[in-house]
Image (cartoon, rainbow, N blue to C red):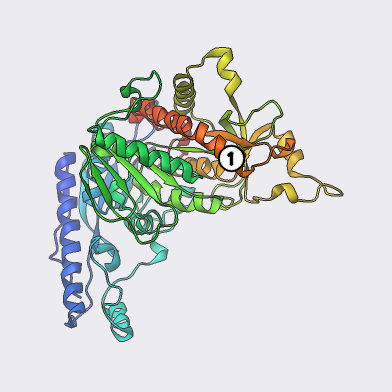
Amino acid sequence: MLTPDFVAPARFDDADAALAQVRRLYDAGVVHLREALRRFVAGERPPARVRAFYPFVRVQVRRAGRADSRLAYGFVAAPGSYETTLTRTDLFAGYLREQFALLIANHGATLEVGTGTQPIPVPFALSDQDALEGSFGSAQRQAMRELFDLPDLGAMDDGIANGTHESAPGEPRPLALFTAPRIDYSLQRLRHYSGTAAEHFQNFVLFTNYQFYVDEFVRLGRAAMASGGGMAAGGDLPDAAFGAGYTAFVEPGGVVTRAGGATEGMPPARMPQMPAYHLVRPDHGGVTLVNIGVGPANAKTITDHIAVLRPHAWLMLGHCAGLRNTQQLGDYVLAHAYVREDHVLDEEVPPWVPIPALAEVQIALEQAVAEVTRLAGWELKRVMRTGTVASTDNRNWELLPARNVATTPERRFSQSRAIALDMESATIAANGFRFRVPYGTLLCVSDKPLHGEIKLPGMADSFYRERVDQHLRIGLRAVELLRQETPGRLHSRKLRSFDEVAFQ
């Protein structure tokens, strides 16, 4: 077997030194695989199987003691050995440095870094510029299977995040929610579904279910770059309300507009399934907007993969059906609870699991609505209602039989006190809960099917023109408020389980 030169595991009590060692080990493995694959594609058959391994970090905690009760992450709950494999040190350097530093500080621990036993699948070692399609025929493809490691789905399940993982006797406990192969798998999927590379994704993510929001975000993003990196103000609000210091705006296909207006790259021949757009700030502190389209399946798919980037928050901004006669088209709904009839997460997060509202996110969203609409108190209640949002996987729920049946959607919505209905919000919130990513939902009422107000083309066009800009600016203002929170406050203890992993 052809592997990189062996490097003995080493111990570190400094986060930067530990990270540097992880980087050396990972880079050596990737270079080894890329070079061997380059020769293989050129027609040179390796004399033996080619393999490289992910680096690992391990911590031995003799006495966990009582951790600071205010902490949500950065510590382990009990004495023992904890370990995880690591990948993409170029992308996760800042994140890993923080996690290492917290473990060292909170436990006085020494970190052990070495080469693990989990092979790096050769497709995960390729750079974004590498492509194998059409490079060789079926015989060479079969030979590739015999000579290189390919992705193994058995090494990348979500048992840790789901709370179902059980370490074997003598095996270290998990240190992070995701193993290196699981992360690499999602990074590949992100590029496929969003049309942009993982490094462009920012720590604050907005999801929407309508193209109108994308159009407005693109307009604002390009305007921000033309103005040198600041978000244009709306109404009487100052520019600072929406953030400044943006350095680039990235669109699908890798089209990048820099602050000042210079643009590079070409748009894709056809748009990806869930296109992503990124207002970039240093240290990934900007805003990503993803158009997930309609339905809970898309919402689960994209959040499954964005979760490995460990964002600080994701928010749903979209349209909903208002369920109360007192609501008007254009009113806002701030979700504080969810009825989950979307079903796509029933195996991972059973319906009996409550999805709590997160105070920091709720406060930011309500304050953002107040600031952008310039309403407060009793007047704010006229345009925004806080309550339960129901999500369904049946877009045509209105057509279900209403006679001689045990229950109907309308009855369930009334019994649950739901005030709005959509197809994505509960999925996004439940996956945020599952993956320990702070979440929130602010919807805009676009129709009232229970009261005869359904979407008609003329009404919809007028409504979208009037509301989308304001709704998006509310989301951007909420992000700016959340950015002012420290990560330790934003990542709520409500999202952590009994025997939680240490990494955020």
Identify the residue at image location x=49%, y=35%.
468
Q: How many marks?
A: 1
Q: Is residue 78 visible?
A: no
The residue beneath circle 1 is: 460
Label 1 secondary element: helix
Q: Position of residue 31 (x, y in %)?
A: 16, 64
- Residue type marked 1: Ala
Q: Relative to the observer, which residue lies in front, 281 or 147? A: 281
Most foreground residue, 463 or 145: 463
Nearer to me, 429 or 57 = 429
The N terminus appears in which quarter of the rendering? bottom left
Farthest top residue in view: 377
Is any atom of residue 74 visible in this view?
A: yes
Q: Is residue 180 left or right of residue 406?
A: left
Percent across and percent down for residue 227 are 25, 32
Q: Callout 1: 10 Å neighbours few (<14), some, many (20+)? A: some
Q: Quadrant of residue 260?
A: top left
Residue at x 49% of width, y 37% of height = 317
Up-down: is 2 above or below 449? below
